[in-house]
Amino acid sequence: MVGCIHDAEDIVQDTFLKYLSVDKTKIENTKAYLVRAVTNNCINHLNAFNQKKKEYLETWQNLELSDIINFDSFDLENEISTALAAVHKKLEPVEKAIFLMREVFDYEYDELQEIFEKKKDHCRQIVSRAKEKITLDKIKFKIDLPNHKRLLDSFNNACSFGDPKELISNLNREIEERKKLLK
């Protein structure tokens, strides 16, 4: 009834504990009593769960992206996704790529020069400008969900496994797509 074995076990245990404290002389059919009690407790559990879900959804529907970033209890994957979305909205693909590799993965400018075929000084300038743009409230780009998901997955893999090749490949793909659009 409740769709979760752990909740079901808790409900059965609570029902049994209540049964132990009830005057059993007033119960004509113990089996029917226990079945009815468990059923009622399941219904109460589902009603409470649906009410919590409704309150949760109403709360989240009224929040802005900036409100979500400030939640300390928000799980790490969502925080990373939100941060990458903010970076995506404010930075050109080249800026995003160089900024992420420098600031998150601590790549040296020599390495960035090789990966993105930009001079070291140009990479430094790009990182500096990217930092300025990120602090601004101006949103420049819309999020392309498939690209964002691919970037998020490759970012998580790079963080988890220490191999950013897939991330670099996705960043370069995005740079190339942007170049095609501008032509």
Image (cartoon, grey):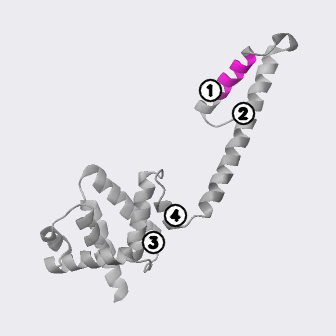
Image coordinates for residue 93, horizontal then vertical, percent:
33, 76
Tell me which segment is drawn in magenta: 10-19
Q: Relative to 135, is 113 on the left or the right? A: left
Q: Earlier in the sequence, mark 2 or mark 3?
A: 2
Q: Secondary structure at mark 1?
A: helix
How packed is label 1: few (under 14 Cα within 10 Å), some, or many (20 or more)?
A: few
| Amino acid residing under circle 3 | Asp
Q: Secondary structure at mark 3?
A: loop
Query: CB under 8 Å between callouts 2 and 1?
Result: no
Image coordinates for residue 59, horizontal then vertical, percent:
62, 58
Badge nearest the viewer, 2 or 3 = 2
Query: CB under 8 Å between callouts 3 and 4?
Result: no
**Residue position for label 3:** 144
- The front one of 74 and 29 is 74
**Residue position for label 1:** 9
* Magenta region, main secondary structure: helix
Seen in the picture, residue 134 relative to 6 is either above or below; the reply is below
Q: Earlier in the sequence, mark 3 or mark 1?
A: 1
